[in-house]
């Protein structure tokens, strides 16, 4: 998910900053400054990328959850700079859209022009409405302060290629972003990252301001950053603050209560938490990856909803997205991309429509069978590239009234290393018949009252589904494993 969002934003920034910059007003400060594009352009960006995002990841299919998030967001928006009497009309009349994405990733972000997203993964990690209010306020703050336009303007100073390379390397190949930068660009990169941290801090301040003005207990926002710090420590993926595009979560968990206290001294009562209604909203929400949409089982990628399976080569990394599956070799020099071809009627048509593109030389093509029973078609091709030619196996199979296509490719010089895997994976595409897998259901959060006073770890079930650890459940509940829990406290317990 992060890769798609960042790739889209980098591409848009490149296109838009190629034109002239403009002097525009900042709704937060009320002052004019040089920005990369006009407000109408920002709105257009939001519209275009929103369509791609919702198609790529899908919205969480629960109208009750969507309405809840919309209601809270509307309250916060009404207190923001985007709705104040002294704000220019073009900003006050901009419609905002608040989406809940069907993703297990703990994330919230905003697109320019009034598009704000939270994931179901984030919602299950929050404990009350006040925490949600601060997060939504933070994202509205990014839009109001026009941070995307500010960032794009700074990138006109020769930094677009540098930043884009770092982002793409980190997200697609799992490499540290800074390792891709050469020494001469590191100073400029750190200046950019410092600016990004400043923007995040400003949005933190705005998020607290908007939530406090709406009467929410804004100090509650700190608990979410405590959870982020614990998740980072658990995954072992924390990086030095100097090289992070966001302030350290530990810094933010300390700063937010102080900012909330400042607004309390200004006379804003901050009492709203709405824990019970928030828990009622997330009760039954999907937790983690949805196995109905595919997962790896004993070396096979299985898809219960579409009832197919195919092998995953040893030591290859699998990335399962809503509309495609990507397999990446352990040496990161070969890729397989698997998706449904919705525009072709046969396997042969699917392959030939691909290989008919300019710059592709066909080495061989033939009819074949997948799983020894399903009609398939394949082509071995060379793809001309300035950076080095690729060799690819394009393979399509007809199964259950759909056309599934593999695009497996590597550099010509690495073909012999990977051709066996390229062939064996699609050739073994087959029907999924394991009834226990076909019936599998997603893990969902159950809200239960603690039956007794005890340590949190003693209140957990003896076994947890889908390899979920007790520490993960403790983080979701914003408690420590050995923390004493009073009887009757509501707990979020994953169950399948």
Image: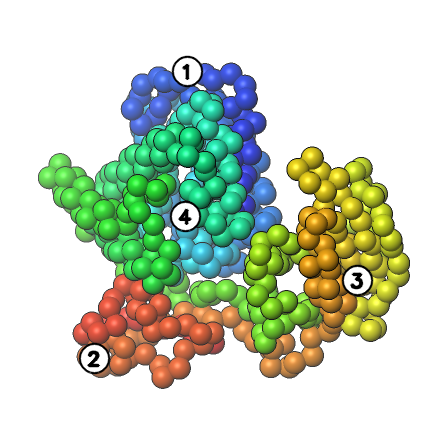
Residue denoted by label 3: 397
Q: Nearer the viewer, mark 3 or mark 2?
A: 3
Horizontal and vertical percent position of residue 387: 66, 37
Q: Residue furthest right?
A: 366
Q: Which of 335/390 is in front?
A: 390
**Which residue in the protein does label 1 denote?**
23
Picture coordinates of residue 115, whole percent (x, y):
46, 39
Residue under circle 4?
A: 108
**Residue wearing tag 2:** 454
Give the CA separation, mark 4 to mark 2.
Answer: 34 Å
Asked which secondary structure carries label 3, the reply is strand
SS of the residue under disc 2: strand
Q: Position of residue 393 (x, y in %)?
A: 76, 55
Residue located at (53% from left, 58% from top): 61
Q: Name the side, left or right, on which 56 lies relative to 2.
A: right
Q: Is residue 102 left or right of residue 262?
A: right
Task: Give the alpha-carbon distance from disc 2 to disc 1, as whole Å.
Answer: 60 Å
Label 1: which secondary element = strand
- Tell us which disc is closer to us: 3 or 4: 3
The crowd level at tag 2 (other Cα within 10 Å; few <14, some 14-19, many 20+) is some
Count neighbours of disc 4 (C-alpha within 10 A) and say few if under 14, some if 14 to 19, many if 20 or more.
Answer: many
| Mark 3–mark 4 distance (CA, rounded to whole Å) | 38 Å
Q: Which comes sooner in the sequence, label 3 or label 2?
A: 3
Q: Label 4 vs label 1: CA separation?
A: 29 Å
Q: Residue at x 27, y 63 (%)?
A: 478
Q: 478 or 129: nearer the eye?
A: 478
- Alpha carbon distance from label 3 to label 2: 55 Å
The residue positioned farthest toward the bottom in the image shown? 462
Indicate which disc, 3 or 1, sits on the residue closer to the N terminus.
1
């Amino acid at each position: 998910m992060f890769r798609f969002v960042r790739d889209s934003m980098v591409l848009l920034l490149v296109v838009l900053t190629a034109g002239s910059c403009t002097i525009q007003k900042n709704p937060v400060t009320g002052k004019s400054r040089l920005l990369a594009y006009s407000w109408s352009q920002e709105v257009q960006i939001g519209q275009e990328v929103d369509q791609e995002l919702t198609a790529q990841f899908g919205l969480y299919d629960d109208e009750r959850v969507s309405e809840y998030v919309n209601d809270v967001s509307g309250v916060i928006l009404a207190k923001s700079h985007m709705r104040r009497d002294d704000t220019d009309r073009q900003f006050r009349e901009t419609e905002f859209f608040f989406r809940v994405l069907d993703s297990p990733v703990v994330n919230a972000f905003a697109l320019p022009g009034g598009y704000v997203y939270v994931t179901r993964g984030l919602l299950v990690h929050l404990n009350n409405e006040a925490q949600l209010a601060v997060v939504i306020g933070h994202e509205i703050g990014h839009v109001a302060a026009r941070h995307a336009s500010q960032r794009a303007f700074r990138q006109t100073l020769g930094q677009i290629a540098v930043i884009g390379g770092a982002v793409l390397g980190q997200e697609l190949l799992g490499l540290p972003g800074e390792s891709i930068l050469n020494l001469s660009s590191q100073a400029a990169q750190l200046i950019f990252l410092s600016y990004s941290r400043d923007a995040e801090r400003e949005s933190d301040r705005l998020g607290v301001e908007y939530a406090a003005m709406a009467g929410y207990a804004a100090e509650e926002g700190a608990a979410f950053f405590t959870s982020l710090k614990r998740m980072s420590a658990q995954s072992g993926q924390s990086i030095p603050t100097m090289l992070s595009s966001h302030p350290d979560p530990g810094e933010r968990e300390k700063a937010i209560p102080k900012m909330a206290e400042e607004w309390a001294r200004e006379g804003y009562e901050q009492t709203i938490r709405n824990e019970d209604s928030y828990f009622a909203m997330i009760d039954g929400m999907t937790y983690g990856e949805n196995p109905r949409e595919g997962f790896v089982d004993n070396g096979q990628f299985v898809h219960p909803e579409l009832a197919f399976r195919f092998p995953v080569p040893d030591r290859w990394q699998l990335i399962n997205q809503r509309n495609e599956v990507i397999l990446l070799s352990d040496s990161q020099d070969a890729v397989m991309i698997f998706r449904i071809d919705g525009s072709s009627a046969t396997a042969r048509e699917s392959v030939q429509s691909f290989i008919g593109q300019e710059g592709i030389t066909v080495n061989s093509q033939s009819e074949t069978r997948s799983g020894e029973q399903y009609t398939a078609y394949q082509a071995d091709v060379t793809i001309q590239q300035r950076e080095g030619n690729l060799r690819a196996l394009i393979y399509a199979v007809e199964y259950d009234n759909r056309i599934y296509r593999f695009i497996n490719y590597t550099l010509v010089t690495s073909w012999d290393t990977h051709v066996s895997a390229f062939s064996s994976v699609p050739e073994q595409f087959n029907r999924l018949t394991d009834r226990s897998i076909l019936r599998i259901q997603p893990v969902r959060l159950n809200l239960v009252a603690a039956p007794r006073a005890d340590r949190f770890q003693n209140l957990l079930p003896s076994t947890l589904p889908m390899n979920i650890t007790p520490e993960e459940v403790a983080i979701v509940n914003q408690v420590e494993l050995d923390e004493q829990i009073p009887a009757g406290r509501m707990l979020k317990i994953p169950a399948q």
